[in-house]
Image: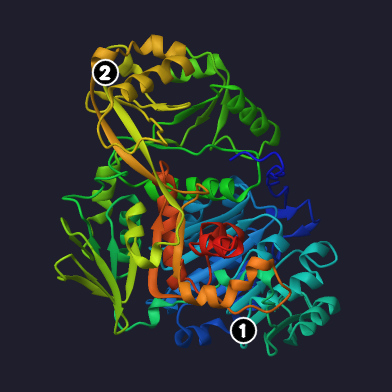
Amino acid sequence: MKNNNQPYIQAIEPADIEWRDGQPFSKQFNDVYFSQHNGLEETEYVFLQQNKLQSRWPSEGDFVIAEMGFGTGLNFLAACRLWLNTCPEKQLHFVSVDKHPLLKQDLHAALQLWPALHIYSAELLEHYPELTPGWHRLHLFSGRVCLTLYFGEVDQFLLDSRYIADAWFLDGFAPSLNESMWSDSLYKQISLLSKPTTSFATYTAAGSVRRGLQAVGFEVNKQKGYGNKRELLRGELVEQQQRSSLASDAPWFSHSCDARNKDGKEITIIGAGLAGAFTARKFADNGYRVHVIEAEHAAAQKASGNKQAMIYCRFSAYNSVQYAFYHQAYLYSLAALKQQPAVFQTGLLDVAYDKKSQQRLRQLKETEVWPESLLRFLDDKEARDLIGMPIDKQCIYMPQGGYVNPVELCENLLRHENIIMKKNCHVDDIQFIDNAWVLSDKHSKVLSTSALLVLTTAEACLQFDQCQFLSLKSIRGQVTHIKENEFSKRLQMPICYEGYVAPSQNGEHSLGASFNLHDASSQISQKDDFDNLNKLSVSLPDIYKEMRLREEDIVGARVGARCHATDYLPVVGPIPDLNYFENNYHDLRHGRLKKVYKQGRFSKGLFINVAHGSRGVVSAPLSAELLYSYTHSQGVFPLGEKVRHALHPARFLIKKIKRNQ
């Protein structure tokens, strides 16, 4: 996936904090983070009261607050306290951006100033993400609050967003000190992400801010400021801006579906592998009655059924949609897997075994994007001291990586009072009848009926007419199981190279995996076993020699078929209405025309989550979150629009139309 034409990822520069009289001061912007008199009271007065939140919340359902400038999180925590005390049955989405986020130790010190918020700040600190570029989705207070943080440039954040805010907290540093935060382009994007009655509040009363917001449709009112500040600004959107629907905006990916509007909260998921299990658990945790239909006798019997799967990310210095997705998926999976008993977070080594991987490590070292809590560069001595075995290669050590038993993981995820699993049931037909998806077997026996249906059956989804436009392929892989010995069992963490070798579990190591594009056989191959062992000996001769693994100690193997999309990204989202796409976008085969295109139309209540290849442990948790967001997020997605479109099922249909296929 390396692309030399792609720019390097830009590292996040943390906030440069100076402590003055016990309070944080930004050296980058030469400004305070909050009032020196009483920052909490200022926050409540400026942002909570001026947006009239307490009076609005009981009648408005789930709510989206968007904030410019996360800072110390004080505004967020004050909003959380009010929300949790007034809206017990609803969810708050809080979306915020910061170019220079605080280091965790600085955040902790700043929040110590507010003992009244202790229980709220403790929750934030526990989940506060790594300072890495892009999107971070956090679930706090038992799911009552969903915090979506973006670390990076505010303009890029707004351009990559599609949520509609109910209220704005405009809390960047003073306009005179932070011009990029208070620009005409920012006001325009704020308006585009608003609706009539969307409110805003800001501590500043600068004339440029007032005029900028008025120019994009906001009614702006001056109010008495807090403390020594004479005035502040608040208001509402009264004239909605129309987002352009030119071809460059890709309206074929636009989708609106809110499952909360449906009478019942029931969903059917076909498939009980990693994608199906994570999706089922996401909906079950949010009060859905989930029917899981599995063709096999148990969960995770296909590609998800290996004894050990690696928890790691092939980090890159390049800024591409592929890497952006997998970097964010890895971070999200670490949080999602942390409490699972089938997970072994032992640390993991990613070894530079050839010239290409050596170049990747050099580039990573140059960019210095990733903090040491995620990866550290090791020389051979450091690696040997860490794993207790000699290794003559450069390595990346991922302290939070490790491995998992996928079968146990899927079983744990599916063990929920809201999940009903039907095994040994093969779905032969799906039909949308009377606003519900009806699933039946080859004898026309109805297996399930629900308004929402998610397909997580890898390439088997192609049996359904609605999915035949997808470009999927199946790639055979074989994992070798080899008996431990007194030398090999010293290996304490997985090592990834061209293949991987895992620590002994139940007396056996997993060694893999083969990658056969032209062999569809489901039979175990002795040649593949020998090839797996040979890859270890060639890529890591010192480790191979030290572990003393022998061909005669091979005790078994497992063959699986990985489902890949042709672009090697998962397929996650709504299934398009094929006839509608052809009728409305057929002229794309002549190039992108300067015309207005209609918004995409999709099969009602039909979604898909497939093509995770060999990375399902890492990609499935975030993909399940993304899929749930298509139905419940009010447009607050866990990924930016560019990456989300790269995963969208309609991407294949649009490509085929453009190629006149």
Image quadrant containing the N terminus: top right
**Callout 1: helix, strand or loop?**
loop
**Callout 2: helix, strand or loop?**
loop
- Labels 1 and 2: the sequence-earlier one: 1
Q: Nearer the viewer, residue 427 or 242?
A: 427
- Disc 1 packing (10 Å; few <14; some 14–19; many ≥20): some
Q: Nearer the viewer, residue 147 or 466?
A: 466
Q: Indicate the position of residue 40 as horizontal and vertical percent values.
A: 61, 68
Q: Is residue 260 visible?
A: yes
Which quadrant holds residue 466?
A: bottom left
- Disc 2 packing (10 Å; few <14; some 14–19; many ≥20): many
Q: Residue at x 50, y 50 (%)?
A: 569
Q: Which amino acid does the dot numbered 1 rest on?
A: Lys
Q: Is residue 203 visible?
A: no
Q: Which mark is residue 484?
A: 2
Q: Indicate the position of residue 166 as horizontal and vertical percent values.
A: 57, 79
Q: Which residue is mark 1?
A: 195
Q: Which mark is residue 491?
A: none
Q: Residue at x 66, y 77 (%)?
A: 245
Q: Residue at x 70, y 66 (%)?
A: 35
Image quadrant containing the C terminus: bottom right
Q: Indicate the position of residue 610 as horizontal and vertical percent values.
A: 40, 54
Q: Closer to the camera: disc 1 or disc 2?
A: 2
**So how many labels did they put on this image?**
2
Using the image, determine if residue 411 lies above or below residue 431: above
Q: Indicate the position of residue 399 as horizontal and vertical percent values.
A: 48, 33
Which quadrant holds residue 164?
A: bottom right
Q: Nearer the viewer, residue 249 or 328?
A: 249
Using the image, determine if residue 418 lies above or below residue 333: below
Relative to 572, 252 lies left or right: right
